[in-house]
Each structure stands twice: as structure tokens, then as C-alpha cells.
Image (cartoon, rainbow, N blue to C red):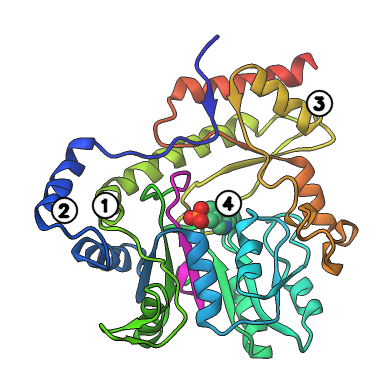
Amino acid sequence: MPDNIFVTRPHLPPLDEFKSHLDKIWETGVLTNCGPYHQELERALCEFLDVPHIALFNNGTIALVTALLALGVRGEVITTPFSFVATSHAVFWTGSVPVFVDVDPVSLNLDPAAIEAAITDKTAAILAVHCYGHPADVDAIDAIGAKHNIPVVYDAAHAFGVRCHCGSVLTHGDMSVLSFHATKVFNTFEGGAIVCKTGEMKDYIDKLKNFGHDGETRVVETGINGKLSEVNAAFGLIQLKHINAAIERRGTIDTTYRKAFSDLAGIACLPDAGQIAANYAYFPIRVTSEFPMSRDDLFYHMKAHGVHPRRYFYPLIPEFPMYAHLPSANIDALPNAALGSQEILCLPIYDTLAPDDVDRVIALIRDAARTA
Ligand SMILES: *Cc1c(COP(=O)(O)O)cnc(C)c1O
């Protein structure tokens, strides 16, 4: 049996490059508390991502919680059922309640008309996701936020480096939140960040992520510990040197898959959202009713042959027990998300995925179509 192929494999730079940074950390004894590597990575990311202000975090979930707290969000938060569960968990941890509305049938990002229809006087924020790194309808969503005077936060965990019609997609809304988890396009083992618009807001977020400390003896907020360590930050600086090459390789795989499935009935590649620069974070296909096997049968068939795609996102967030009781969790009212959840399969894509292995994934799906 050939080696297993998983949906992703974390990007790791040459270990030698990391060692000199570790030597430095051992020499200085500065391990955390927003030290020199932390500061350097914030500067480097502002430049690389072309954003005005960034605050690093120890993971994306704490960054999401802190973003909502920093904006004073408390009440109902309109969000997507079609995401990783952390999107809703973050809402819950701020004492707010998620309100699920349906996604667009093609992009699987929040449908602006559904957001607008769900706004009430209890709506405290909109939390949208750039699913698979495909930009949400940022102009329409930002306009809804502005019209109703409610903050807009983008969970941009999938959207590192993505550019849309007006530059970095991360400059939309009031804040955008990144994840640098091991499985994401850019990783610091664990990590995350908030992108915000003003220096004052960054200072406030920096206090919130450090217990609310303001200097040595004053505590001005009930903050949390959201700091990224020096080891993680130093690692991020090394990763950044290799990220363009890694994204380029992902792009080649994306092209290969799209070509391979262009004539295969029942396999539909998700169109990219017309972004100027993509990051190819995921390769979602829809296994439609035209395919001779169900999505789940294809999923288990591939696993039996050592290829491990993922059903992102199945189940939908509102199907999980802590959300299922909410009035907005009725799946019948979320038909586009429900169909996506039944049809989507995310295929392996990562920079070190060998061309032969890409061909193996393709052959497995094409053979399944022929022999089913
Ligand atoms: C990964 C992810 C998160 C959580 O990020 P962590 O860094 O793992 O805490 C949040 N939202 C989405 C959409 C994600 O994919």
C-alpha cells in the first residue's frame, strides 16, 4: 500500500535557518512578553500583507474573542453556519449568541441579503468568514455594517495573503482575524493575529492580550493572555521567507486539479472568487448528484486507498449540540449551507505534495467515476 496522503501537511522551513534564532533566544533569555522577535514579525507582516496595524496572538480563536471584545460586541452576532466551529465558539466566549444565516450557493460565503434580512435591534455585530480563502462579498457586507452602525469582523483564518479588487482583503470591516495554526497556509505552529485600522485600537488590543496591563502597576482591563511567544514569532519570520514559493506551488496544484476535473461529470471545482491574489489554502470540489457515487462513498473509498480528503464543513456548526437549540439553527432555513455540507470534499493541497501524488488523487477520483 502506498503512503497516506493527507489533506494538508504543515509547511516547515529548513531547520538550520531556525537554529540561529533559537541561539539568540537562549542568549538573551527573552522568551515572550512581546519581545524583539514578536515586534519584528508584526512589522514584517504589516509589510507583507500590506495592512496598517497587526497584533499577534497565540492562536486565532483567542484573537477572534479579543477582536469581538475590543469592539464591545455583546448581543446577537450574525455569522455563517459553514465554517470551522471556532467561528461560533468565539462568539459564545464573549457572552454573545450566534445567529446563523445562509450562505451564497456558489461561493459558500455569507449571503449579504440573508444578513440584511436577519438584522434586528439586538444585532451587535457581523462575523463573516472568507471561506477557503475566497473573499466574502466584502463591499456588500461592509455596507450593511455601516448602514446599521454595527461592527463587521472577518474571520480571515483561511485568507493569509489574499488580495481582492482593492488590495489586501484583510483591510475590510473593522477588523480581520488570522490563524497561524499548523494546518494553515502560513503557520507559527500555533498563532494568530488581529488586523485593525488605527494605532489606538492596536494599543487597546495589545493591552487586552496582556491581562489588561498598562505599565508595571496599572491594570485597566480584564484582559486575557493572548501573547505569541518569541519562539513562535521567530519561526514566523523564517516561514515568511518561504511563503511566496509555497503559495506558488499550491497554485500549480490548483491548476492541475482544475484541468483534470474539467470534463468529469459530477465533480465541480469551486470557482475562485475573482481575487487578485489567491493563496490556494484549500481545494474544495463538489461531488454532485451526477457523480455515480455519493460524496461520502467517495470519501470512504479514497480513505480506503490511503488518500484522506476532508469534508470541510460537515457537520454544519448549527448541527453541533451547543448550537442546535438556537432558533437560527434550523437547517431547513439554511439550504445552501446544507447542500454545500453534503457535497464538499477538500482535496489534498500543500507545497510539498509531489506531482505523482497529485496524479494519484486525480486517478483515484476518475477511476471511482468509471467503475462505480
Ligand atoms: C483555524 C480556524 C480558526 C481557529 O484558529 P486557531 O488558530 O486554530 O485557533 C478559526 N476560524 C476558522 C475559519 C479556521 O479555519
Amino acid type, callout 3: Met
Q: Earlier in the sequence, mark 4 or mark 3?
A: 4
Question: In the structure shown, which secondary structural element does the residue marked by tag 4 occupy?
Answer: helix
**Region rendered in magenta:** 168-184
Residue 251 visible in rendering: yes
Mark 4 vs mark 2, foreground winner is: 2
Instruction: Please identify the quadrant where the N terminus is shown.
Output: top right
Q: Residue furthest top?
A: 1
Q: Residue at x 57, y 33 (%)?
A: 257
Reading the image, the residue beneath label 4 is 132
Q: Is residue 36 magenta?
A: no
Q: Residue at x 15, y 57 (%)?
A: 29
Reading the image, the residue beneath label 1 is 231
Reading the image, the residue beneath label 2 is 25
Q: Earlier in the sequence, mark 1 or mark 3?
A: 1
Mark 4 vs mark 1, foreground winner is: 1
Q: Residue at x 80, y 77 (%)?
A: 118
Mark 1 vs mark 3, foreground winner is: 1
Amino acid type, callout 1: Val
CA distance separating discs 4 and 1: 28 Å
